[in-house]
Image: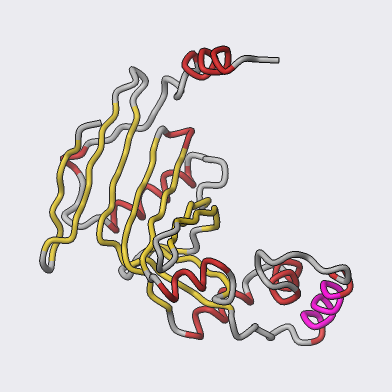
Amino acid sequence: MATPDDLRSRLRSLKPFEARLPLFDPDALPEEPLPAVIEWVQQAIDAGVAVPHAMTLATATEDGVPNARTLLLKDVDERGLWFASVNSGPKGLELEGNPRAALVLYWREQGRQLRVTGTVRVAEREIAERDFLSRHPIARAGAIAGRQSSEMPDDAEQQLADAQRLVAEQPDFVPEDWTAYYVEPETVEFWQATPDRDQMRVRYRRFGVGWRRDRLWP
């Protein structure tokens, strides 16, 4: 059995990134961050990064107890970064009481990380409906059948079967608690690694009606 010292040594010996990483010119960034966010997401997709839309969402209760989970980025536009979920689950309840969140997108193959903090807004109902109906029928049935993050009852399989039948019989059905959210950014940080273990960090912060852009120490 490995000792803590053995594990520590093994972790320290790991090479974090491959030699070929994308170029990052902080001076070429736009005045506002969202166009650069869109560009980085598109570059991750084009480069064949594994699950490029996997995104960590961190929320907190009204008492400040943090919680984090990985979900899927649904879109990026002029309003912010989008995701969707039921509003009756833990994340939805936490956002109702404390509508602020932090996001992290990490693209290992490119040595890139994107961090965003901001206010979470609820989008129009038609956007939520469109998002839900674009999901695979099995995913829709799963969202309908169970209460998110609650313990599965003994009849869970029957509930799932009933939900699958509902989806088949009513293909336009959308549960009332399915919600589309977007994070309206207040800070956006671009982090780029280099093969020699150096790091480049650029942070945007809302400043009045515009943005302030700063280089940060690693």
In which image quadrant can residue 206 be found? bottom left
The x, y position of residue 171, in whole percent, is 73, 83
Work out whether residue 97 or residue 135 is closer to the camera in this orientation and state it.
Answer: 97
The x, y position of residue 105, in whole percent, is 44, 48
The x, y position of residue 204, in whole percent, is 21, 52
Tell me the residue at 31%/32% (across/down).
23
Check the picture and name the quadrant holding the C terminus.
top left
Magenta segment includes 164: yes
The x, y position of residue 172, in whole percent, is 68, 85
Work out whether residue 22 or residue 151 is closer to the camera in this orientation and state it.
Answer: 151
Residue 174 vs residue 211: left or right? right
Work out whether residue 125 or residue 93 is closer to the camera in this orientation and state it.
Answer: 93
In which image quadrant can residue 81 be found? bottom left
Tell me the residue at 65%/15% (across/down).
2
The magenta region covers 159-168
Check the picture and name the quadrant holding the N terminus.
top right
Say above or below: 99 vs 73: below
Tell me the residue at 55%/57% (across/down).
71
Q: Residue furthest left?
A: 208
Work out whether residue 44 or residue 216 is closer to the camera in this orientation and state it.
Answer: 216
Residue 194 vs residue 107: left or right? left
Say above or below: 60 vs 203: below
Say above or below: 105 vs 143: above
Q: How is the image coloured?
A: secondary structure
Prevalent SS, magenta region: helix
Magenta segment includes 13: no
Residue 158 vs residue 51: left or right? right
Residue 95 vs residue 25: left or right? right
Q: How many marks?
A: 0
Tell me the residue at 49%/56% (across/down).
67
